[in-house]
Image: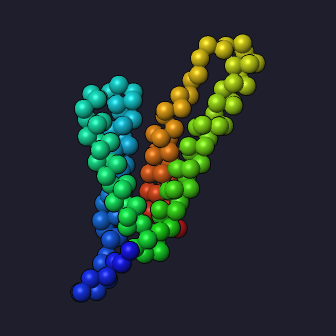
Amino acid sequence: MSYDTKAGPRDYGKMHLFLSYVAAASLVLLLLEAFGIIADGYSLIGTTLGGLSIIVMYGTRNSDEWIASLWSAGANAGFIGAMAWLVFFPFIEGFYDGLTGLDSHQDFPSGSAAIAALACFVIAFNLKRIRGY
């Protein structure tokens, strides 16, 4: 993918960082809806904008080295968060339920792994951006 125009190379940095704010706001709306604080319609709007921002961020992730490193940190954290949600947390829950004899139900639904991955991505991306390393 070429980022050059007739006037010179295009700078996607500002757009990419603005979209990271949109993704963070989307995550906040999604979490507020998950805890029942806001109505479903608001989280649908936030999720749609967040999904579109992640898609555009994915398309411009290699525009320069700094943004590529931000994306790499977010993607790695998202993967680790999803794997922890799907593998590690159910193991700990099963171990605890086995010790206490409380085998009522699964407390970590697998459908929430996407939310966990998005949360880890957005937090790691923005922490690395704010800290500057």
Q: Where in the figure is residue 66, as x and y percent of width and height? A: 46, 72
Front-most of 40 and 31?
A: 40
Image quadrant in which you'd find residue 45: top left
Q: Residue at x 37, y 67 (%)?
A: 60
Q: Where in the figure is residue 74, as x and y percent of width and height? A: 50, 56
Q: In this view, which residue lies farthest toward the right?
A: 99
Front-most of 10 and 133?
A: 10
Front-most of 22 and 117?
A: 117
Q: In this view, which residue lies farthest toward the front?
A: 1
Image quadrant in which you'd find residue 64: bottom left
Q: Is residue 10 above or below residue 16?
A: below
Q: Where in the figure is residue 70, as x and y percent of width and height? A: 47, 64
Q: Residue at x 26, y 82 (%)?
A: 5
Q: Residue at x 38, y 43 (%)?
A: 27
Image quadrant in which you'd find residue 21: bottom left
Q: Where in the figure is residue 43, as x and y percent of width and height? A: 30, 36
Using the rendered image of the protein, determine whether residue 131 is visible from the camera's viewpoint: no
